[in-house]
Structures are given as structure tokens and as C-alpha cells.
């Protein structure tokens, strides 16, 4: 069969695998998929395009930033600057492919991905090739950019030989990342499906969720941290005698960075580092090839029927504990959340965004700028906290028709979601307040600005829930899932708007009086007033 035809058909296999991986990582969406399959497929395609866009943007910015960081130290410590910068670039390339596409690749190990293709007159070899090409189609955009833009820039800046060696190292790094991705996806699938009710299965899902969050936040924020990382390691070298730098040269892909630096600058580095770079790169190249073969073997095993898992059925005595509606909904949501990776990521990721702001704070010099940035980022964070609510309402998509049949009022459901939402909201506010202690500000009282809005999450959560409920009801309810961009935009804008009320009270008072104490008192009074109004009139926001 011709490669062009295989490549075209591989698109169907790729879409099916992404669909199954999406459903497997978000099992509460099953009813919605049965009700509106076309919308879900459109959402998956849109998600894939967004992943590609983010990958291309991050790789492009990181490539340029890596080169500029090297040039900044070219006159003083070029060898280590190039080694560390290139190593960080390869590391982020590895993490980018691994974390962003982990949930997609698990779909290739699920049974039924190639069922339809198997009914057609294709040989087993053709089906294996289709599966492999379908997998490659998922990763083709970031892999091609990793292996093209950076080697081109390195070649233009440091010569043809350096560019060619960088190209080889980029290819090896991409292959290694894809291989690890295949093997970890297989392990993840087996562990989360073998014993569905075990604590190990739950722990693996939760660890995978936080791993995804940390990986994505690390990837998106590395552009801010790269100069500080290079400066830190260069400060430790002191002529290349640092034990930490020597140990770092043993770790792939930093080994490739030291290899490229050795080829570019010759004997500038120590003999030990150059020996490790050359020998280590050769060994890691061989290990990468073996890892790729192991990954492809695992992928071929999934072609015929998927991986077999032995899910044990655990008989348990059914015990019913009567609860109040709100408490019962909270317990239900918390138990379902550990099976829904998408919900966990959406709930927690606004907190992780906080740490991407540190470079901007460190970069500020004047005290007044620190105060301005803390105030500005407080508003930004509480706005992005609206993403947390989207993660919570996605839990209810196990079937809105089922939930509507239960004796639960809309008000109780929204209030329960607001209670959960208030937790990450308060954590964000408290963390930002403590982080402000690291910097000099125009007045110590400004550190209370984020702290005072910590209990405000209940008001924001209930308001966001009421607005989303009215919007979903007007648009038809069931078919409008949490992945709809309009819901995300409404949630973020509503959270930002409601949260800005006490912040606006602080800012306007400060502008009018230039008295920080009075401004903080006004902010606190606004928060208290809104909490009182919430307690007395919140039920009127939603018709019970």
C-alpha cells in the first residue's frame, strides 16, 4: 500500500485514538458523548489544534531565547552558557512532547482503535503501519519544529558542523521522548485499568494529574526562567570544577548540550566534561534506539485488541449514609474528580500559574513596580480562577439527564460547587500574599490585598455558577459541555469581574487618599459586605 494512502487513512486511526484517550481520561463525559458525539469530536479536533499552536509557539520562543541567552555570555563563559542553554532546550522539548500528548497516546492502547480498519482487506503489516503513522500524526508538528528551527539557528550562529550535530541531537531527543511516551502510556493504561477500585489505581491517576499540571506549567513558564537557570549554573562552574555541573553532564539531554559545546568551542571545557559528553552521547544514542524499539513493540501489541488488563471485581457491602444535599454533592464531586483528569487539571492549574509570575516580580527593581505587579496579578489570578469552576461543572457531565432526575435543586448544586471552588481560590490568594514577602513594596499593607479576598471565593463561585446555569439553560442545557469555549470565557470574565469589586474599592480609595491603611480597610469592608449579601440573598440568583 502506498505511503500517501496510508498517511491519509492514518488520520482516521489518529482521531479514533484521540477520541478513546479523551473518553478514557474523562469517563464522566460518556453520557455527553452519546448525546452529542459531533460536538465532542469537534472539541477534540479543536483541542488538538490548540496543542499544536501552543507547542509551536513555545518551541519558537524557546529557540530564540536559548540563542540570545548563549550570546549574552559568549564573551565571558560561552562553553557553559551553550551547554546549559542547549540542555534546557532539549529538556523542555522532551517534556513538551511527553506531558502535552500523554492523554492522547493512551488511546492507542485501548481496544477497538483498529477494529474498523481490521474489517478492511489490509494485511497485518498495513494495520501496524497505520497505527504507527496515526501515532506520528499526533506528534508530527512539534517534532518537526524541534528538529528544524533550533538546528537552523545554531547552524547560522555557530557554523554548519554545530548545526548538523544539533540536528542529530534534536532527532535523538525527539525519538527518546516519543519512546518514553509510548512506554509510560502503556504503563499508565495498565495500572489505571487492571484494578479499577484499588488505591493504587487512584494514586496513579492523581499522580498523573499533578504530573501533567507541573509539566505544563513548567513548559509554559520556562521562557521566563531560562536566563535565571543559565545564570545559576554558570555561577556554580567557577572554571568548570563544580561537582553539580559534572553530575549534570551525565544526565540526558544535558549530555547533548555539553557535546555540542565541545564541538563548537573545542578544548575550552575540562577534559572530564568533554569525555563525558562524547562517551555519554554515544551511549545515550544507543539506548534511545533500544527504547524506540521497545516502544514500537508495545504499540504493535495494542494493534490486535488492545492491552489486556485484569480488572478484579471487589464485592463490597452497600452502606448508605444520609447526608445533607450540599454535603452529599461535595462528596460525590470529590470522589468523581480523581477519575477525571481533565477536571483535576482545570481545578488546580490556576494555582500553578502563580509560580509563572515570579520571574516578572524578580525582574522589577523599584518598589512601586512591585506593588503595582502584586495588585495587577491579584486581579489576573482571581480571573483565571474561573477555570477551576469549569473543571467542577465538567464532573456533572456524567449525564445531566440523570442529575436532573435526582431530588437536587440547582441552588444546592451550585452552592456545593462554590464551596469546592472557594478552596483553590483561597489558596491562590494566600500564596500570593506570602510570596509578596519576598519583595520590597511601597507599603507593607499591600501584602494584605490578596489575603483579604481569600474568603471571597464563595461569592465568586456562586455568581459564576448562576451565570453559567442561566447561559446553559438558554442555550439548551445538555448539549452545551464544559469544553465549550463560550463557557470558559464567561466563567473567566465573571470571576474576574466579581473579584475586581473589592480590588476596585482598594484602588479607588488609594488614588483618592494615598492612604494604604484606609484603602485596605475599604477592601476588607467590601469583602464583608459581599459575604453578608451572599448569605442573605444568594438563593435569589438561581431559581430553586
Image (cartoon, helix red, strand yellow):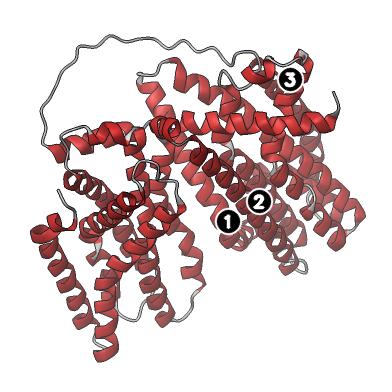
Q: Residue at x 56, y 40 (%)?
A: 99
Please give left or right for residue 80 compared with residue 394 in the image.
Answer: right
Decide which of tag 1 and tag 3 comes sooner along the chain: 3
Q: Nearer the viewer, mark 2 or mark 3?
A: 3
Q: Circle 1 is placed at which residue position? A: 222
Specify the quadrant that holds the N terminus.
top right
Q: Nearer the viewer, residue 401 or 427?
A: 401
Name the side, left or right, on which 497 lies relative to 517.
right
Local secondary structure at mark 1: helix
Q: Is residue 536 above or below residue 198?
A: below
Q: Position of residue 525 (x, y in %)?
A: 15, 73
Residue 56 position in % (x across, y down): 67, 53
Report whether 233 appears left or right of 27. Answer: right
Q: Is residue 314 above or below residue 492?
A: above
Task: Tell me the CA gap for discs 1 and 2.
Answer: 9 Å
**Structural distance between the alpha carbons of marks 2 and 3:** 35 Å
Tell me the CA gap for discs 1 and 3.
37 Å
Counting labels gives 3
Depicted 428 relative to depicted 511: above or below: above
Contact? badges 1 and 2 (CB < 8 Å): yes
Q: Residues within 10 Å of mark 1 (few under 14, many from 20)?
A: many
Q: Which residue bears the numbered disc 2?
A: 88
Look at discs 1 and 3 and give the one toward the viewer. Answer: 3
Q: Position of residue 270 (x, y in %)?
A: 78, 50
Mark toward the start of the polypeptide (2 vs 3): 2
| Viewer-nearest residue: 72 or 314 | 314
Q: Give the residue at mark 3.
A: 128
CB atoms of marks 1 and 3 within 8 Å: no
Amino acid at each position: 500500500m502506498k505511503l500517501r494512502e496510508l498517511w491519509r487513512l492514518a488520520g482516521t486511526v489518529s482521531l479514533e485514538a484521540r477520541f478513546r484517550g479523551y473518553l478514557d481520561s474523562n469517563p464522566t463525559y460518556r453520557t455527553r458523548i452519546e448525546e452529542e458525539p459531533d460536538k465532542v469530536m469537534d472539541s477534540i479536533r479543536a483541542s488538538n489544534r490548540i496543542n499544536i499552536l501552543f507547542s509551536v509557539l513555545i518551541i519558537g520562543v524557546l529557540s530564540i531565547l536559548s540563542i540570545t541567552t548563549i550570546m549574552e555570555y559568549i564573551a565571558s563563559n560561552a562553553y557553559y552558557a551553550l551547554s546549559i542553554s542547549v540542555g534546557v532546550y532539549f529538556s523542555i522539548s522532551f517534556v513538551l512532547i511527553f506531558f502535552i500528548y500523554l492523554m492522547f497516546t493512551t488511546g492507542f492502547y485501548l481496544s477497538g482503535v483498529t477494529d474498523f480498519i481490521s474489517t478492511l482487506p489490509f494485511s497485518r503489516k498495513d494495520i501496524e503501519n497505520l497505527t504507527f503513522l496515526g501515532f506520528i500524526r499526533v506528534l508530527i508538528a512539534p517534532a518537526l519544529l524541534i528538529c528544524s528551527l533550533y538546528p537552523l539557528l545554531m547552524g547560522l550562529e555557530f557554523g554548519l558542523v554545530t548545526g548538523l550535530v544539533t540536528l542529530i541531537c534534536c532527532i535523538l531527543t525527539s525519538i527518546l521522548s516519543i519512546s518514553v511516551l509510548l512506554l509510560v502510556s502503556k504503563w499508565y493504561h495498565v495500572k489505571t485499568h487492571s484494578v479499577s477500585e484499588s488505591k493504587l489505581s487512584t494514586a496513579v491517576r492523581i499522580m498523573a494529574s499533578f504530573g501533567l499540571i507541573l509539566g505544563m506549567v513548567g513548559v509554559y513558564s520556562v521562557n521566563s526562567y531560562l536566563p535565571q537557570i543559565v545564570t545559576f549554573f554558570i555561577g556554580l562552574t567557577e572554571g568548570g570544577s563544580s561537582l553539580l555541573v559534572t553530575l549534570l553532564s551525565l544526565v540526558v539531554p544535558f549530555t547533548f548540550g555539553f557535546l555540542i559545546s565541545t564541538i563548537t568551542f573545542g578544548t575550552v571545557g575540562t577534559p572530564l566534561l568533554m569525555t563525558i559528553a562524547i562517551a555519554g552521547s554515544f551511549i545515550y544514542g544507543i539506548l534511545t534506539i533500544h527504547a524506540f524499539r521497545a516502544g514500537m513493540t508495545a504499540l504493535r501489541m495494542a494493534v490486535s485488541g488492545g492491552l489486556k488488563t485484569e480488572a478484579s471485581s471487589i464485592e463490597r457491602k452497600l452502606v448508605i449514609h444520609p447526608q445533607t444535599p450540599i454535603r452529599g454533592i461535595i462528596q460525590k464531586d470529590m470522589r468523581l474528580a480523581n477519575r477525571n483528569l481533565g477536571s483535576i487539571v482545570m481545578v488546580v492549574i490556576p494555582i500553578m500559574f502563580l509560580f509563572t509570575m515570579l520571574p516578572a516580580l524578580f525582574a522589577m527593581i523599584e518598589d512601586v513596580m512591585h506593588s503595582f505587579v502584586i495588585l495587577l496579578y491579584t486581579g489576573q489570578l482571581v480571573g483565571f480562577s474561573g477555570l477551576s469552576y469549569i473543571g467542577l461543572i465538567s464532573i456533572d457531565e456524567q449525564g445531566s439527564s440523570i442529575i436532573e432526575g435526582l431530588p437536587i435543586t440547582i441552588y444546592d448544586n451550585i452552592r456545593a460547587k462554590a464551596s469546592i471552588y472557594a478552596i483553590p481560590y483561597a489558596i491562590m490568594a494566600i500564596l500570593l500574599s506570602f510570596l509578596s514577602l519576598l519583595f520590597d513594596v511601597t507599603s507593607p499593607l499591600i501584602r494584605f490585598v490578596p489575603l483579604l479576598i481569600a474568603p471571597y471565593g464563595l461569592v465568586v463561585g456562586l455568581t459564576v455558577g448562576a451565570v453559567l446555569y442561566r447561559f446553559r439553560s438558554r442555550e439548551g442545557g445538555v448539549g452545551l459541555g464544559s469544553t465549550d469555549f463560550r463557557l470558559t470565557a464567561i466563567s473567566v470574565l465573571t470571576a474576574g469581574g466579581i473579584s475586581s469589586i473589592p480590588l476596585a474599592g482598594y484602588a479607588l480609595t488609594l488614588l483618592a487618599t494615598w492612604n494604604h491603611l484606609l484603602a485596605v480597610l475599604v477592601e476588607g469592608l467590601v469583602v464583608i459586605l459581599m459575604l453578608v449579601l451572599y448569605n442573605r440573598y444568594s438563593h435569589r440568583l438561581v431559581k430553586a
